[in-house]
């Protein structure tokens, strides 16, 4: 129990590192632009009047635009930043349960992008009044009512009936597995979300058939919602998934060129 608490605290700290990573991306892209202008003034005669022909300038402007778009969405909004940090912490905890998830993130495996929306929706269902709800609401705004000022839970209180039915399905499934607070039950559904039903079931299961049927039914419903998460606004989901993977791996998205280019 104490080891689990220590691991949870460590995952929480790593989750908060997501804020630092995203903020540093914005700052570094700005610094790169300033550095470019400092260097280019010493060789201004090499700058093409058609600015789009200057590869060094173009690459830095693209990097600046991308990082500032992410910063405007995920860093300036305290609610979304908290949601990303919370979700990153949950995914790191899931990596302890399913080591394959760590490999998927490091390799950007295609299976990761099948599992990631399932994980996002599953974490939302596990605690819909938590900060992570804001991220799901931003991706599926038509499924939520407007959130009231000073009340972060108001959006979930006004969800549509289909999303409420999914939540009820989740609660009943977890009850059959041992309860929403049962650690083993949560790890069971996390493995299912990451590995998929067929792969997970092939490894054996100690739960009664009624519970496993309920899990299968839940994940059939969850699959539809994961698709909606990706397809409602593909651009927003692609940006969100890239942000989550970037925060999980901690790698620099755009490394500066080794040789200065105009």
Image (cartoon, rainbow, N blue to C red):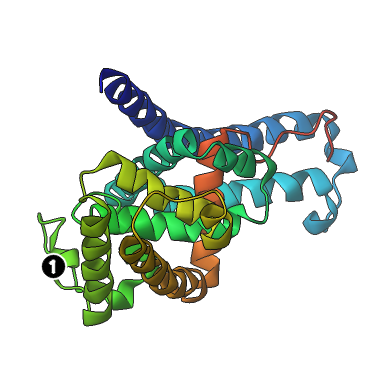
Task: Give the percent coordinates (x, y) of residue 150.
Answer: 10, 54
> How many numbered discs sit on the rendered protein?
1
Q: Residue 53 location, x and y as percent? A: 85, 55
Q: Is residue 126 left or right of residue 197?
A: left
Q: Residue at x 50, y 40 (%)?
A: 98
Along the viewing direction, whichever of 151 and 185 lies nearer the viewer: 185
As drawn, the residue found furthest toward the bottom would be 161
**Residue 245 rendering spot, x and y as whole percentages:** 55, 45
Q: Is residue 240 visible?
A: no
Q: Is residue 120 left or right of residue 78?
A: right
Q: Is residue 143 visible?
A: yes
Q: Please, is residue 2 above or below residue 168 in the view?
A: above
- Secondary structure beneath dot 1 equals helix
Q: Nearer the viewer, residue 246 or 40?
A: 246
Name the residue located 33 percent from the left edge and 30 percent from the top edge.
Answer: 12
Task: Please tell me whether residue 128 is drawn above or below residue 15 in the rendered image.
Answer: below
Q: Quadrant of the C terminus?
A: top right
Extreme residue toward the right, this view: 46
Residue drawn at (83%, 32%) of the image:
260
Query: Label 1 belongs to which residue?
Result: 157
For label 1, the crowd category at 10 Å Cα-Cα, with few meaning under 14, some 14 to 19 and many 20 or more, is some
Specify the quadrant that holds the N terminus.
top left
* Vertical order, 192 against 165 (above or below): above
Q: Position of residue 107 (x, y in %)?
A: 69, 42
Query: 231 or 120, which is in the foreground?
Result: 120
Q: Which residue is located at x 33 percent, y 67 percent?
A: 214
């Amino acid at each position: 129990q104490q080891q689990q608490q220590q691991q949870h605290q460590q995952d929480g700290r790593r989750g908060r590192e997501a804020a630092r990573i995203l903020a540093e991306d914005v700052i570094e892209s700005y610094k790169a632009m300033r550095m470019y202008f400092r260097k280019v003034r010493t060789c201004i005669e090499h700058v093409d009047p058609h600015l789009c022909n200057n590869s060094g300038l173009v690459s830095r402007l693209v990097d600046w635009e991308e990082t500032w778009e992410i910063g405007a969405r995920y860093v300036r909004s305290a609610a979304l930043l908290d949601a990303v940090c919370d979700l990153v912490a949950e995914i790191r905890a899931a990596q302890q349960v399913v080591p394959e998830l760590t490999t998927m993130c490091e390799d950007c495996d295609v299976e990761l992008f099948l599992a990631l929306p399932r994980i996002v929706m599953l974490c939302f269902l596990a605690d819909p009044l938590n900060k992570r709800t804001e991220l799901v609401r931003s991706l599926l705004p038509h499924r939520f009512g407007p959130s009231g000022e000073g009340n972060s839970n108001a959006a979930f209180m006004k969800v549509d009936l289909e999303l409420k039915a999914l939540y009820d399905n989740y609660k009943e499934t977890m009850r059959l597995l041992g309860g929403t607070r049962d650690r083993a039950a949560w790890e069971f559904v996390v493995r299912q979300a990451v590995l998929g039903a067929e792969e997970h079931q092939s490894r054996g299961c100690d739960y009664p058939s009624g519970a496993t049927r309920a899990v299968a039914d839940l994940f059939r419903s969850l699959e539809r919602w994961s698709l909606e998460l990706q397809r409602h606004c593909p651009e927003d989901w692609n940006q969100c998934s890239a942000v989550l993977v970037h925060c999980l791996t901690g790698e620099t998205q755009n490394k500066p060129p080794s040789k200065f280019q105009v």
